[in-house]
Amino acid sequence: MFKNLFLKEIQETIYTQRFFIAVLLCLLLIPTGTYVSLKDYGQRHDSYNESMRLYKERSEGNVGINFRAEGYRPPSELSFLSAGLESSIPNKIMTSNSGRFSIESESGSDMSQSELFGKIDFQFIVSYVLTLLAFIFTFASITGEKENATLRLIMSNQVPRWKVILAKILGNYMVFLAPFVIALLFMMLIITATGSFNIFSVEILLKIGAIVLISMLFLLSMFSLGILVSTMTKRSMTSMVVLLFIWVVFALVVPKLSPMTAEALYAVKSQQVLTMEKRIAGDAIYNDYKEKQIDLLDRIALDYGVEDEGELFGNIVPLESEKALEQYNEEKVPLDIEYEKRISSEMRKLDENYKNNKRTQTTWARNLSRISPISSFAYIVSEIAGTGLLERENIEQNARIFQDEVKESVYDKFEQREYHTSGGSSYFSSNSKDGIKSEEIPVPMMSSYVRKPLAEILQAEWVDIMLLLIFNVLFFAGAFVRFLRYDVR
Amino acid sequence: MLKATDLTKRYEDGHLALDHVSFEVKKGEIFCLLGANGAGKTTTINLFLDFIEQSDGNAYIEGIDVHKEPLEAKKYVSYVSENVMLYGNFTARQNLDFFAKLGGKPNLTKDDYYMYMRQVGLQEEAFEMRLKNFSKGMRQKVGITIAIIKDAPNILLDEPTSGLDPKAAAEFVKILKGLREEGKSILMCTHDIFRAKEIADHVGIMKEGRLVMLRSRNDFLEDDLEKIYLEYMQEAVV
């Protein structure tokens, strides 16, 4: 009996216009979106290669203690599935001999039209188009049968209600998945044909598989929701209006409103304010350092019997002057180290504080947006595709590794000292430890950019995965229970 | 056999849709329930199909209490609704196939379905036509074919002739007579007093949820059924 009901649902749905629309949209949007996104990926990859080449070209022979090596984050291969934050994640790493690396965006925004309207990637198609389609598939699943009196006819037979509702959810879902799966096969064909990247790497295949499974789980929750609403209403038109309202809330209102609400509830100062604060703190520390430097000079001047520290190096006998300079250079070293430490610690403190506040605000926004399954879905897919928030942490990890590599291959090969002249000015001197000339040191290149493995991403995204499962259970069970008590008249 | 004993339905808003209605439809009998809209005819059918819960009394199908054992009771009843829509994108045969399997007849062949459709007078070219192209009379015939295929001993008909042209209605009545001869118990709710007079073995007139009159064929043929009905309806208006 279940088989009969299930097959009827499949057959009935296949004959409808909505199935034709689903086939059309899936076969049109997914392969087209994939092709366009892959082209875009190709361009970004070319630009990445060009940046690397230019960096190497202009750095040849210039490697030394003050050299700032550059590493570039390659565009994520899976960004064609979810563009996510790809364009706003910094893509350039710069090392320094102080041990502090910086991460920045090389090109910034290209101010393209797609930034205004968003890109038509896989995540967009599933989140918006297929969700809407899932609602179109299900809004009349119960109410339509009621209006046609076929539900009365079915229920006048020896049919348990749970079989009817289960057949409805699964039958409709299977039909809906058919064009989706075919479109995915086309997508894989396009990736292979364009040769944009090696699709046959295990990690890539696993990640694509995970995204497809998560998409199916997400779409099942939307199907169950559609059927739940259909069991809660008496007329198809009411069901459609309610589902459209839900779609607007889930797809547009919640994801856009939650960051704004988080900003209002947990305000964080702007980047400009942070820069100002850093400048003020830096100035205060520098002034303190300068005062200590003058104190040191005063003390040395006193030791050498000169009243004014300005006369220290010029107005005493050359031999004494040389001794004074030597003593000053020696005693200044701890001052310099302390200054460096204080500056570094204060800047790090301000940065960390800002980052923590920003992180808290983002967590608030994320948690608020999780009311909508579409948000949870977007978070999981973008993280797996390497274009989510985790990628911001990932580039830092890669930067740290690159900094260490450059330290070992370049900075550790030099010694540097700061000297003060008798004229009062100072200069740095660096010497290679092994007598290697600067031009002989190869330009340090970032050996590889490590992406977060799937297992780690899934672990980090467990909340959203659990939420998708909970949404599924809630909507499915809701539709089930509602139909058991549904007035079929 | 269909039996209602003190069947009562009061809705949550307090409206009394059915007030202690009792009757019995024996084997090989057609029982027509007449009454104005809202008299409680469809509520009676809904209670026999367990679509709603009674407030008092019981409905029995083949002696089985419908509310206590709905699935078991439904084994012994077929139902034809007022407006048979069925699945518009399915052909007549596909509709029959789906409902036949639901009704416990999984092994029927295409020829069997054709034979049943011929039996109710459906034209050959309509067998494999999509139902959305059918007239109301044709759809009604498919509806009664579903009931025939199920071959249950009891049939519930809710306004089956409403909207049918006279020829189609006459054909429908002919089919019902055939089913009565096969020994089916048929409960038909209708406005159509002329059809009721033509085929009913018993007639009940319902008014505001109560069964105000119950007469056998001999009784209502002696008196003028139309006159009796109008008298009761007149009282209702007053």
Image (cartoon, coloured by chain):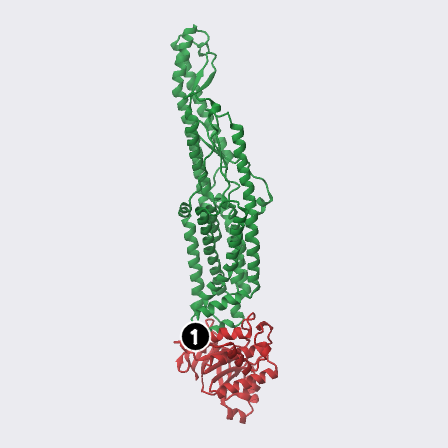
Closer to us: A466 or A44:
A44
**Chain under label 1?**
A
Res A400 quadrant in image: top left
- Residue under the point 54% across and 40% down: A44
**In the picture, residue A336 is in which quadrant?**
top left
**Mark 1 burial class by Cα count in 10 Å: few <14, some 14-19, many 20+:** some
Above or below residue B115? Residue A439 is above
Please identify the quarter of the rendering in which residue B5 is found: bottom left
How far across and how far down the image is residue A436, in percent?
Answer: 44, 22
In the image, residue A293 above or below residue A33: above
Indicate the chain coloured green by its letter. A
- Disc 1 on helix, strand or loop? loop
Q: Which residue matches tag 1?
A: A158
Chain B pictured colour: red
Quadrant (top left/top right/bottom left/bottom right) for the N terminus of chain B: bottom left
Figure quadrant of the C terminus of chain B: bottom right
User: Which of the pair A97/A423 is nearer the observer?
Assistant: A97
